[in-house]
Structure formats: structure tokens, C-alpha cells
Image (cartoon, rainbow, N blue to C red):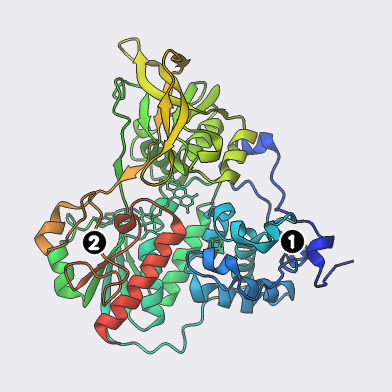
Amino acid sequence: ERLNNDFQFLDVARQDPTKKPIDVRKAEFVEIYHPFTQPEVEGQSHRCLACGNPYCEWKCPVHNYIPNWLKLISEGRIFEAAELCHQTNTLPEVCGRVCPQDRLCEGACTLNDGFGAVTIGNTEKYIVDTAFAMGWRPDLSHVKPTGKRVAIIGAGPAGLGCADVLTRNGVKAVVFDRNPEIGGLLTFGIPEFKMEKTVMSRRREIFTGMGIEFRLNTEVGKDVTMAELLQEFDAVFLGMGTYTYMKGGFPGEDLPGVHDALDFLIANVNRNLGFEKSPADYIDMAGKQVVVLGGGDTAMDCNRTSIRQGARSVACAYRRDEANMPGSVREVKNAREEGVEFLFNRQPVEIVGDGTKVTGVKVVETQLGAPDARGRRSPEPIPGSEQILPADAVVLAFGFRPSPAPWFADIGIDLDASGRVKAPAEAEFSYQTSNPKVFAGGDMVRGSDLVVTAIWEGRQAAEGILDFLDV
Ligand code: FAD
Ligand code: SF4
């Protein structure tokens, strides 16, 4: 019997969708969660208290109408729920999969007070996956074309967010990307066990059906110039991400067998998707003792990709403790379940080798000292606590710094001291750069962050562009 009453949270416990068996997860590059069933999603969504001032909505970076779509789905009104999800979010089924809900919407749920937050992310994913499978598509029949055209550089979440809002307002969006598929890091970064690539190919069909044009395999600055785009289009949006790899700055980082995280992940995706140019590009962890350095989402993805490639062992060394890891709690748990060994409070000081290849990582133990300028407690090495972690492959996952294009200066785009494009949210036209015709958002403006924050900035920049174009 299905329970549906105002005190459902007392009778029905929070439930996440079930996961596939560990031995399957350790071998397959497919999503690890089974989808919710309709009775499960109804039971879970009806646990929502419909708080008068929903904190989840405020904590969600795109301010989704969460309690409203939870109510619709609890009543089985899938198409209306999908429509509402799309009013605030360009890629709801993606965010449902990859957002760190524990520190966003679900972290703010009132039911965290001992009852367990509503499973918001998986419900968002369910609504949109189910609506698409049932044939629902965004309805743009009421949109009147304005005759304006905007070029978007980058088909990542920021560029797609911008293209979506422009298209819904009658502006033609033409999206350029150097990659052969849309998605940015969603396709060429985040692995399939978090989000299968069919999610993005389905989106490409939907966006194309909405009237967005994609020009893929096209690098701006090489295959087409910015001057041409500024000439041809009424405005340009930059959503080009951040692609300078951070280094540790210690000896041995250039030894054979030491890899940058994104090189490793992209090579794996390229093989799985059939985009591999040469088999030599693939980085194979089969049978190896792998040490991953870092504690964010990228590190978790490298850990779990190594496991699936058949690594003999995977150890992840991070310089702070578990409570201070930047990665999503859920993904750390998933990595641990799949056999990753975590070594906390270990700071790498050197990568050691035998002259021809890596043989280990020298780490020193740390203790957490006083908070730094951002309030994070900085790790301090404990003298004499060095040890060598044996390794025949090492992955550096220290994050990314901005990667401004050389042609930014030619078109008058100002950067801040760290190389991020200056495009203030509070400008007269939000996210406008120092070149009035050019807008920007996502990682290249805020520094590497999240899918959902990139979507938000792309959407907000589209609002700025609409005001600028006066349409
Ligand atoms: P990107 O996604 O980087 O997209 C930029 C696009 O611009 C790319 O497709 C690039 O090819 C294109 N481009 C750049 N220059 C040019 C040019 N000159 N011409 C044509 N095209 C160009 N976030 C989460 O929320 N959850 C996660 O679980 C998560 N996991 C992550 C795992 C990894 C391994 C990484 C690296 C990041 C992860 N992130 C995660 C962060 C998230 O992916 C990014 O914050 C987000 O993708 C940024 O979006 P963006 O649109 O700004 O940039
Ligand atoms: Fe939560 Fe992300 Fe969905 Fe917002 S977009 S409701 S933060 S899962």
C-alpha cells in the first residue's frame, strides 16, 4: 500500500536508488545506480514537507522549484514536472546525476534534522529521463524569432545554458566546440559511471530539435577567427572552461608513468566512444599499482576509472583529512566501496623513480594547522614522517587554473590577476566582458567549479545578452 500523508517522512525512510553489485561496478563503464521506479519516486517525493521558505531552492545554484516539482511527481504528473524542471535548469537530468547534492539542495533540506533529506537529485533525474522516454520534448511553438544571432564558444554546461535561454527567447544560437561531441567536461572528463554518454547525445538531439546549431570539431582561433564571429554575429558568449593543469611543484612529476588527470580520463573516454586517434594515446592501468594524488571530484574519477581498467591496487593520497576533502561525500563513498584505499593527511613531496620510470611517491604526514585566508585549515607536515608509497603509475589530480586564449587581448577582453575572464554578474548587462559585444561565464569566469554553477552563469549571461540586444 502506498503511503501518502503529511507525515510521510515519519513512516517512509529516505531511500537512494539501489546500486549495481560491486563486481559489476568494478568492471563496467556504466552508471552504478538503478533508476527509481514510479512508486519509489512517489513515496520519496511525498516526504517533502513543502517548507514555506524552502532552503533547498536557495541552496540550489539554479534555484530549482524543488518542492513544486516534488509535488507534481508525487502525483504522477510527469510532463508538468519536466516542464517545471526546465524553467530553471538547462540540464536537469545531468545535475540530478552529478551535482554534489549533499552540500547543495539535499544538504539544506529541513529533514536533515534526523530524518534524512528528500532524495532530490535522483528525483530530478527520474522526472526528466522518464519524460523524455515517454516522448516529452520542450515546447517552443510559442517562441517568436527575433532575427538576432549569437555565437557561443564552448558546448560545455555554460555554453549550453546560454544557448538554451537565448533559443527560448527567439535568438538563434550557434555553438562552436573543438570537440567532436557536445558537453565539455560532461563528455570529455566526467566518466560514464557517473553519467552515461547517451545522456549528452540525447540532449544534442533535443537541442538541435529546439533550433540550436552546433558546429563541432571547430576550434575558435584556428578553424574560425574571433574577428569573423564578431563580424557575423550580434554578440558572442565565451564558455571555454579552464584547462591549465595544476602541478605539485615537487621533483619527479615528469617521470614516465606520471599522468595528468584529464589526459588519463580523456584517453579513456576517447577509447570508449571510438574517438581514439592512436592506441598509443590510451593510458592503461591494468595490473598496475596506481597512486592518485588529490581529493576532489577529478581524483575520485581517476581512482574509479583505474579500478575499472583493472589496476592491481589504487591508493588515493590527500593532504587534509576526510572531513576537509573537496570532493562529493557520495563519490568518496562509492570509490571506497569499489576498493580504493584512502590515505588522508599525506602530502606528496617527491615522485621517485629508477631513472626510466616511476616507482613510488614519497609522502609526508600532515596535521591540520590554522585556517588560511579562505577559512580552510592548512596542512602542516610532521617532520620525520616520510614514507614511500610504491607505485608504477601516478595520477596528478590537483585541479585546474584558467587557460585564457592568446587572442583575448586582440579583442579587448580583460582578465583578473589569476587569468579568469572579468565578466561581473552585477554589470549593467550581466556577465558582459570588457568588450561590450562579448559575454562570458562558467569555469573561465569563476575558476573551476561545478556543472550547475556553469549552467547558472550561462543562463544569466543569456539574460544579459537579451538585455544588450534589447529583444
Ligand atoms: P567545460 O565543461 O570545460 O566546457 C568548455 C568547452 O569549451 C569545452 O567543450 C572545450 O572544448 C570548449 N572550448 C574551449 N576553447 C575552445 C575554442 N577555442 N574553440 C572551440 N571550443 C573551445 N562538476 C560537478 O558538478 N559534478 C561533478 O561530479 C564533476 N566532476 C568533474 C570531474 C572531472 C574529471 C572534472 C575535470 C570536472 C568535474 N566537474 C564536476 C566540474 C565541471 O565539469 C565543470 O565545472 C564544468 O564542466 C564547467 O563548465 P564550462 O561550460 O564552464 O566548461
Ligand atoms: Fe540539487 Fe543540483 Fe538539482 Fe539544484 S540542480 S536541485 S543542486 S541536484
Q: Residues within 10 Å of mark 2 (few under 14, many from 20)?
A: many
Quadrant in the picture for residue 69: bottom right
Q: In the image, what residue type sits under mark 1?
A: Thr
From this view, report whether residue 50 is shown above or below residue 240. Answer: below
Query: For this rendering, which residue is in front, 19 or 368?
Result: 368
Residue 290 as seen in the image, left or right of residue 413: right
Estimate the x, y position of residue 134 in percent, counting from the top left: 64, 72
Estimate the x, y position of residue 233 in percent, counting from the top left: 21, 75
Q: Can the viewer see residue 240?
A: no
Q: What's the mark number on residue 37?
A: 1
From this view, report whether residue 247 is shown above or below residue 223. Answer: above
Estimate the x, y position of residue 329 in percent, counting from the top left: 58, 44
Q: Which of marks 2 and 1 is in front?
A: 2
Q: Residues within 10 Å of mark 1 (few under 14, many from 20)?
A: few
Quadrant in the picture for residue 37: bottom right
Query: Looking at the image, which residue sits at the far top?
Result: 354
